[in-house]
Amino acid sequence: MHRNKQGQIRVLEAFLATAVIFSALLLSRPIYVSFDSQDDQDSLYNIGLNVLVQLDREGELGRLINHRNWTEIASRLSILLPLGVSYNLTVYDEESEIINNSSISSGDLNGRNIISIEYLLVDRADFNFYVVRLQLAWMK
Amino acid sequence: MPTVSLDTLLASSVMICLVLSSMVGVFIAVQPFIEHQTSSYDAETSRRLAEYLLLETGSPADWGAETNATLISFGLAKENASTPFELDIDKVTRLNERNKYNLSFLEAFTALNTKDKPFKIIIKPVFNATVTLSSQTEEASEITYHFNISTKRSNLPVAASFKCYAVIGNYVTSNSSSTSSLGEGSIDVSLPKSLNGTALLVIFAQIEPKILSYTVHSFAHNSGSSPNQAGSYATLSPLNYTLRADLTSSSNRILYAKVFTYDYTFNLTQTENASTTQCFAVPKILDESPMILVGTGLNASSSEYFAEWVSYPQIPLDFGLDFTGRYHLADALSSRFLVTINSATYECKIIIGGT
């Protein structure tokens, strides 16, 4: 009778071990999903950096920041970025203080995988130093 | 058989199944990670290769303008470019198959020296402008044409300001207007009734400084026949700031050649005049705009004007392998860039296969 109970325990142990293994596999799935989207994020980073380089051609971005022309910056970003990309641009001065007093953004970044690009630039007219942070996310 | 043996046998079977299924499960779970390592490396290589095409000048560095030079390595960047992704106008123009001096894909592929990486390069304006003739009004000495113009980016409307030139023979008239936020606009142009034949409406649309698009619409003016088909009188090939016209017949010659940009228009000076070839010098215009080169002349038999045109840089273009073809189907990675050609911004898509 005692031996019979030991055998049943082994069966229970085996089923418990099975449950543990399969739950581990199920839990590992989200990790794979986030790992898989890394290529999309890399591609988005390259797109964002390319857009900033184009926007800053001939010191244009520095000039717009110096004139505090946030609407124009937002308008150009909306045109240069591909459709389906949300963005938020923040401009810092050399003291790391945010200087854009209105939002330079389009779309919603909440709850999305965001990539952040930091871009340093100097306004060539007055030699002001700025740090621009562009956050991007794919709309899904 | 005792009950305990049955229990042990059952437990052992379950454990064996568990080990086997966990092996399968672990393999299934790990396989994407292993594959991702390889595919991520391939994707990064393709991205770098696409950047290389746009950041390197190739060798010789002036292979765009030097048509006699043998291409050693392939790259589209402008020599001594001041900013990244600034492309050479002639290198880009030579990618267009309609250009007389076009580069074959085999030459470019061989010069790139990456045997397992076929590629395709697509360069086009950031947005599209289209024009349709809506109506015309005939008056005593002139005919007024009403055109509808639409500007769209990825099929979504975008507001733009535009400038248009109407050309027939040596006569040019210009007008400007803008499209609304719905991407729709209209414009009127008047041409004198003393001229007849094929007229061109050249339209430059601009949504921001340096971001332009263009379209050219040919229409019959004061004539019963339809406008001439492109290339029926001459094939125009711009390169190295020279416009070459290969005439289809020695009797139909180009009498007037002009260059148009968003802000300027100039007459071109003829530099060569052979029986079936004419060459014109194109001025280096600092306007941040594509150039439209127009050649007009008189049809020897009908005495009506014909008109031929070409853009410089010769964009839009589509160079390389067609990855959608039945025999070209392969894994491919597409990278999108903004590039500068002659101070204007264009969209460039590079598709690298074999990833």
Image (spheres, helix red, strand yellow):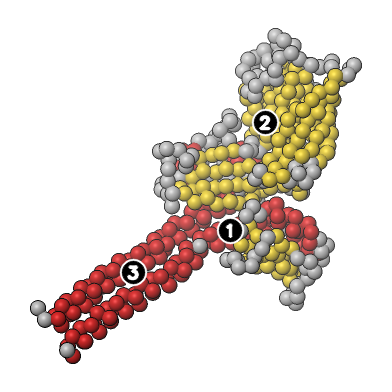
Instruction: Return the residue at label 2.
Output: B310
User: Residue A110 at what x, y percent from top left?
Assistant: 64, 67
Q: Nearer the viewer, residue B317 or B11?
A: B11
**Amino acid type at image mark 3:** Val
Residue A134 seen anywhere in this rendered image of the structure? yes
Most extreme residue toward the top is B301
Disc 1 element = loop
The chain identifier of the residue carrying mark 1 reads: A
Between residue B231 and residue A12, name the one nearer to us: A12
| Identity, as a three-letter code, of the amino acid under mark 1 | Lys
Q: Answer whether labels 3 and 1 touch (C-beta < 8 Å).
A: no
Q: Position of residue B81 (x, y in %)?
A: 65, 51
Residue at the spot of label 1 = A140
Q: Residue at x 24, y 79 (%)?
A: A11
Q: In the rendered picture of this protein, how many numbered marks are placed on residues? A: 3
What is the residue that sits farthest to the left in this orientation?
A: B1
- What residue is pinned by disc 3? B26
The chain that hosts pointer 2 is B
User: What residue lies at 56% left-to-right and 39% top-to-bottom?
Assistant: B318
Which of the two residues, B103 or B304, is positioned nearer the viewer here? B304
Label 3 vs label 1: CA separation?
30 Å
Q: Is residue B49 above or below residue B123?
A: below
In space, the residues marked 2 and 1 are separated at their CA atoms by 40 Å
Q: Residues within 10 Å of mark 2 (few under 14, many from 20)?
A: many
Q: Chain of mark 3?
A: B
B149 is higher (above) or lower (below) than A116? above
